[in-house]
Amino acid sequence: AQSVSQHNHHVILSEAASLELGCNYSYGGTVNLFWYVQYPGQHLQLLLKYFSGDPLVKGIKGFEAEFIKSKFSFNLRKPSVQWSDTAEYFCAVTGGYNKLIFGAGTRLAVHP
Amino acid sequence: EAQVTQNPRYLITVTGKKLTVTCSQNMNHEYMSWYRQDPGLGLRQIYYSMNVEVTDKGDVPEGYKVSRKEKRNFPLILESPSPNQTSLYFCASSPQGVGGYTFGSGTRLTVV
């Protein structure tokens, strides 16, 4: 069965620090990979997605993610975080039947 | 504006009182889905629909019903709500086979 694992449940950073959030998935077939962000009290918004092609994907707000097929990983990165990046981040994967499977989420708190 | 609209945003109800959460999308998407979000568990799929009159169970369907009589609407029905269904619910839609979901704003349900 498909599953998504996010290694960090809570991350606390100071502004301007670099961010990397880990995501690993288990699925033997072709996958589409996503990162969503949920700001406090809001719904999920798509940060970036990978379907095929260049494994380094750039998204909105300066985020990027790298798909490493051999490691079944899709880690999210940002070189310099801002206070406004405080949110919960979800990695997700689709395999068969368009079903989107989410990780448990990582809460990021950025201190000024 | 392309969007997924859920109603109500907040709902407090009592155990056993039937309720319906509505979901409507204006993007002509074939695929619609309901998720519940609980702390530490991420989002889990309740039910999904691949097109009109085609629905299927997700990972946590117990205690829920859905219907898809029209392409744009996908209501979630709780026939006899129980306190363990207290959660944040999201409706989502996507074009068939693509996986890029658009989420609604969420419905926070409390069952007392």
Image (cartoon, coloured by chain):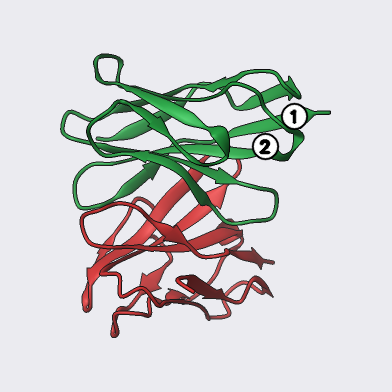
Chain colours: A green, B red
Residue B106: image x %, image y %? Answer: 57, 63
Residue B78: image x %, image y %? Answer: 48, 73
Q: Quadrant of the C terminus of chain B?
A: bottom right
- Left or right of residue B12, residue B71 in this image: left
When the figure is inspected, residue A66 is found, relative to residue B106, above or below; the finding is: above
Secondary structure at badge 1 equals strand
Distance from Cα at disc 1 to Cα at disc 2: 7 Å
Label 1 marks which chain's residue? A
Q: Which mark, residue A110? A: 1
Q: Which residue is mark 2?
A: A85
When the figure is inspected, residue B23 is found, relative to residue A74, above or below; the finding is: below
- Left or right of residue A80, residue A34 in this image: left
Q: Earlier in the sequence, mark 1 or mark 2?
A: 2
- Left or right of residue B40, residue A57 in this image: left
- Left or right of residue B2, residue B19 in this image: right
Q: Residue A88's quadrant in the figure? A: top right
> What residue do we see at 30% from left, 25% from top?
A55
- Report crowding for label 1: few under 14, some 14 to 19, many 20 or more residues within 10 A (C-alpha): some
> What residue do we see at 69% from left, 18% from top?
A17
Outermost residue on the bottom side: it is B69
Secondary structure at badge 2 equals helix
Residue B42: image x %, image y %? Answer: 51, 42
Q: Along the line of sight, which residue is nearer the eye, A66 or B50?
A: A66
Q: Amino acid at mark 2?
A: Asp
Q: Amino acid at mark 1?
A: Val
> What residue do we see at 47% from left, 70% from top?
B4
Q: Residue A57's quadrant in the figure? A: top left
When the figure is inspected, residue B62 is found, relative to residue B38, above or below; the finding is: below
